[in-house]
Amino acid sequence: MGAMLLGIGTLHFAAPKPFDGIVPAELPGSPRFYTYASGVAELGVGTMLLAPKTRKLGALAAVALFISVFPANVNMVRLWKDKPLAMRLGAIARLPMQIPMITQALKIYRSS
């Protein structure tokens, strides 16, 4: 999970445009701010998960992170209503995937 978050966090900086596109327009400020902020959060949480001394706290932070990015995933479904079916299904599939990610983070928390 830590390595996955490091990879995704890095993508927020290497290729921010797709992330900008799913930031809910209702949020104040620029989408790029939220893209970079979530990238920093993912890098930080990923690093915490990889370090044994901070793994337990990192697992709780991962739960908070997965919950906090859920609105962007919902927004993606809303924005992609006119995309090809495969893309729409991919966006919809992301929503329930938050549950096993949160569950896994809680398992990491309990075992740390």
Image (spheres, helix red, strand yellow):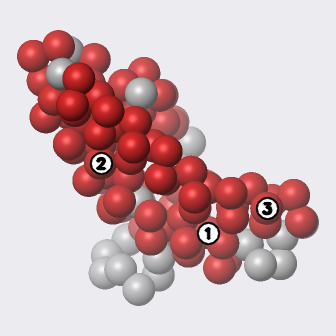
Nearest to the eye among marks 3 and 1: give it. 3
Q: Which amino acid lies under the numbered mark 3 shown in the image of this protein?
A: Leu
Q: Residue furthest bottom?
A: 26
In what quadrant of the picture does the C terminus appear?
A: top left
Q: Which amino acid lies under the numbered mark 1 shown in the image of this protein?
A: Met
Mark closer to the chain start, 2 or 3: 2
The residue tagged 2 is 63
Percent x, y of residue 92: 69, 64
Give neighbour class at mark 1: few <14, some 14-19, many 20+ (Cα, 10 Å).
many
In what quadrant of the picture does the N terminus appear?
A: top left
Residue closer to the observer: 15 or 88:
88
The residue tagged 3 is 89
10 sits to left or right of 89: left
Give neighbour class at mark 3: few <14, some 14-19, many 20+ (Cα, 10 Å).
some
Rounded to the nearest whole Å, what is the CA distance between mark 3 and mark 1? 11 Å
Percent x, y of residue 32: 41, 60
Q: Quadrant of residue 15?
A: top right
The residue tagged 1 is 76
Is mark 1 in CB contact (under 8 Å) with mark 2? no
User: Could you tell me which residue is drawn at 47 percent across and 81 percent down?
Assistant: 25
Please say if 21 is above or below 38.
Answer: below
Residue closer to the observer: 28 or 109:
109
Percent x, y of residue 75: 56, 74
The residue tagged with tag 2: helix, strand or loop? helix
Mark closer to the chain start, 1 or 2: 2
Nearest to the eye among marks 1 and 2: give it. 2
Percent x, y of residue 13: 44, 40
Residue closer to the observer: 89 or 35:
89
